[in-house]
Image: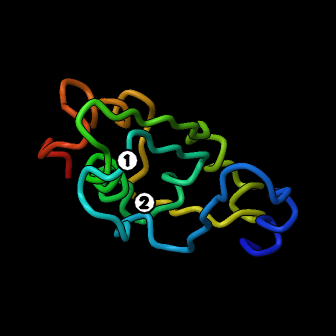
Amino acid sequence: MIRVAAKRRWNGGGVVPRFLIGDAEHLPYRDATFDAVVNFGIIHHLPDWRRGVAEVARVLRPGGLFYFEEIYPPLYANPLFRIMLAHPRENRFHGPEFSGRFSGRGAGTDSGIS
């Protein structure tokens, strides 16, 4: 899927994107590597979403930004979606708990997020 999407979306000009298949709970990057991390509805798929958030904080440089989009938990808890889509059912989060993992903490530092 990554190879297909990369071929379809990259027109061969400008900045060359890098595509990586990896584990969001164990990102293969050094601490404080990125100025920004973007998440489009992935964290709610992780069995240990707190570990994923901690990895985001770890790879962000001080002052780095985390842009995220997540779906509303009752939406993926809907019985129809449970049949159609695989989502972890235990240890889920709502907006205040999710954003609270970052509040008052400097991203990219030893923030204590776990």
Q: Residue 100: which quarter of the image?
A: top left
Residue behind mark 1: 34
The colour mode here is rainbow
- Image quadrant holding the N terminus, namely bottom right
- Callout 2: SS: loop
Distance from disc 2 to disc 1, alpha carbons, whole Å, reads 30 Å
Amino acid carrying mark 2 in the image? Glu
Taking the spot 42% from the left edge, 36% from the top edge, the residue there is 66
Residue nearest the viewer, comparing 80 with 59: 59
In this view, the residue in front, 43 or 108, is: 108
Along the line of sight, the residue nearer the viewer: 49 or 6? 6
**Position of 88 relative to 14 (above/below):** below
Q: Residues within 10 Å of mark 1 (few under 14, many from 20)?
A: some
Q: Quadrant of residue 107?
A: top left
x, y percent for residue 75: 66, 42
Is residue 74 left or right of 46 when viewed as pictured? right
Residue depth check, mark 2 versus mark 1: number of the one nearer the observer: 1
Dot 2 or dot 1: first in sequence order is 1
Give the labeled residue for mark 2: 90
Which residue is rendered at x = 12% and y = 46% of the image?
110
- In the rendered view, would you say 108 is above or below 2? above
Q: Residue at x 18, y 31 (%)?
A: 105
Compared with 17, 37 (above or below) is above
- CB atoms at circles 2 and 1 under 8 Å apart? no
Residue 77: % across, % down: 61, 50
Q: Amino acid at mark 1?
A: Phe
Name the outermost residue toward the front. 14
Q: Position of residue 98 (x, y in %)?
A: 37, 37
Residue 99: which disc?
Answer: none
